[in-house]
Image: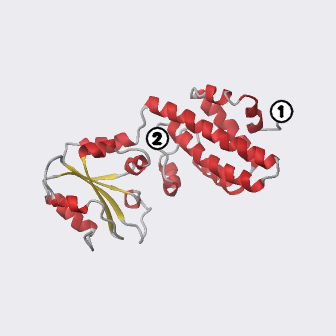
Amino acid sequence: MIPKLTYEALLARAATDPAVVGLVLKGSHAHDGMATEYSDRDVYVIVAEGLDTGLLDLDGHRSAEVDVVVTTVDDFRRLGGYERYALTRAQIVIDRLDGEIAELVAAKGQLDSDEAFQAAAGWLDAYANSLYRSVKNARDGHLLAARLDAADSVGFLLELLFTLERRPRPYNKYLEWELERFPLPGWETDMLLDAIGRIAGTGDLDFQRRLFGRVEAVARKAGLGPTLDAWGEDLLLMRPGPDHRPK
């Protein structure tokens, strides 16, 4: 580990190293207005395959100033999962491949349609499951369990709503930032943020059911009716209004 590496020093080295084909900045400094005095800079240094570079020694460097990952173009292309959102809003600092680095970053923010549909079905089922457990626990007097399940349901709901738009869910830290700048179509941002905050904080049963009524309509319009229908009469417990299931 090399002490006292600064972001500026890293940029200077990358700018003069012929093996470097890209440099990408992610994290708080890539989200306008989110960086604080405690924020380091998270950087991907992308190098050409097979070219020798001393920057490989910086791979895994972590400090209060800068965190560095050194990777090849192919390995950068394969990055996914939890890293997708971080790269979605990343800034391209160096791109020596005629825009290819920028294209790779842009692709991280757009889920494949088939991938998104399959993932959405799973998130919808997980959301319904947590909501169902929350409602049942509240009904049966298990109030702490009901609130915990309600809080769980919020995470699954956010995964669902962003996946339906073929976007990776933002980290909690950037949720408000993301929605204020890139709202989810069909959802008023202040209302949605208030709803998830209220549900996560209080587990309000009637509020959960009312929100589910809207989510169900959105999900069915997206072709996810079979996932909901698999719940059978249990849907009646989740929907707005009294529980009309046969006893």
The alpha-carbon separation of the residues under discs 2 and 1 comes to 36 Å
Q: Which residue is mark 2?
A: 167
Asked if one can make out residue 223 in the rendered structure from this viewpoint, the answer is: yes
Give the side of residue 245 with respect to residue 209, left or right.
right
Judging by the rendered image, the residue that carries numbered circle 1 is 244
Q: Secondary structure at mark 1?
A: loop
Q: Residue at x 65, y 30 (%)?
A: 228
Q: Dot 2 lies on which element? A: loop
Residue name at image x 41 percent, y 38 percent: 110
Q: Amino acid at mark 1?
A: His
- Closer to the camera in the image, 77 or 95: 77
Question: Whole-percent x and y of residue 236?
Answer: 77, 33
Residue at 52% in and 41% down: 162
Q: Position of residue 136 (x, y in %)?
A: 77, 44
Counting other residues with Cα less than 10 Å from the Cα at mark 1, is it few (<14), some (14-19), or many (20 or more)? few
| Residue 77: assigned label | none
- Given residues 207 and 115, the one toward you in this image is 115
Depth check, front residue: 224 or 178: 224
